[in-house]
Amino acid sequence: MPATTSAAIVEEVVGRKSMIKDLRGRGALVTGAAKRLGREIALALARAGANVAIHYGRSEEDARTVVREAEACGVHAWAVRADLSVEEEVRDLVDEAYRLAGPLDILVNSASTFHASDFATFTRADLATSIDVNAWAPLVAARRFVELGGQGHIVNLLDTRVAGFDWRHVAYHAAKTLFALFTRQMALRFAPGVQVNGVAPGSILSPSGQGAEHLERLGRESPLSRVGEPRDVSDAVLFLVATRYVTGQVVFVDGGRHLLEMNHG
């Protein structure tokens, strides 16, 4: 290969790497950013240079800590409270984030509720509660993002088991499956100004009440035979908010587990 061609390729690769890392001046809202994956995503965006609105529901102290950690990256950050089960508060959340960090370029719908529910006994109330937070609230947030003139990227946090079933969390699974449908619909309806994609994590963090052994067992069941790290998810988000020609996709960050879920109960 001629030297000039090799140099050109290296320059292009370095340029793309810089694009993924450099989000300076962009405004972002991350829901559920006080803890767990939302926290990791918010801090990854801050490290990349984005100013970040940190949404929280009840974890104000944790949200303030994330704000301080984000500001240490040299960006602006704010903690914004909202109850995502209340539609008006969801709209107000986006309005406030737009006022503080706007114009918004990035919306990451990370917040979710995760409660056990069995197929034989789950109730209509269980389903409605899960849909309110896990599907309806992010749809409302996304529509408000667009209404306010938001341009750029929406990334929705799904779950690897949207490719199959989750018999222990039936209401949650139904809501996340609906959210996956909304993600594809958003990609069509919000184009061309907004690219909408999903990230579906697998075995990354232990559910509340479950220890590391439970997570390790799930990781061993994946094709890659290991658990992931929060950074694996934030890396996928960073890629999606930097890409210019991807929309309507779901990136499974699960060690290949979705391949086992497909068409199997």
Image (cartoon, rainbow, N blue to C red):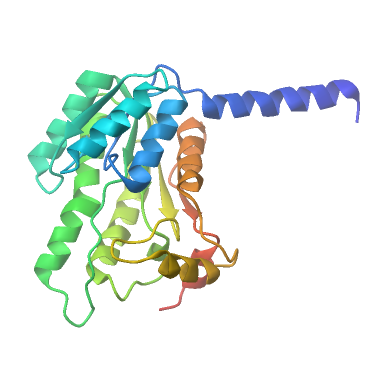
Residue at (51% x, 60% y) in the render: 227
Q: Is residue 135 left or right of residue 26?
A: left
Labels in figure, total: 0
Residue at (16% x, 53% y) in the render: 132
**Vertical relation: 126 (above or below) 237:** below
Report the quarter where the C terminus lies.
Answer: bottom left
Furthest toward the right, the residue is: 2
Query: Does residue 62 appear anywhere in the picture?
Result: yes
* Residue 167 coordinates in the image, percent (x, y): 31, 76
* Residue 165 coordinates in the image, percent (x, y): 36, 72
**Vertical relation: 172 (above or below) 29:** below
Residue at (32% x, 61% y) in the render: 177
Furthest toward the bottom, the residue is: 120
* Residue 258 coordinates in the image, percent (x, y): 49, 65
In front: 47, or 236? Answer: 47
Report the quarter where the N terminus lies.
Answer: top right
In front: 55, or 149? Answer: 55
State the image quarter where residue 76 is shown.
Answer: top left
* Residue 209 coordinates in the image, percent (x, y): 28, 65
Q: Is residue 165 left or right of residue 140?
A: right
In front: 188, or 109? Answer: 109
Query: Does residue 105 appear anywhere in the picture?
Result: no
State the image quarter where residue 110 is shown.
Answer: top left
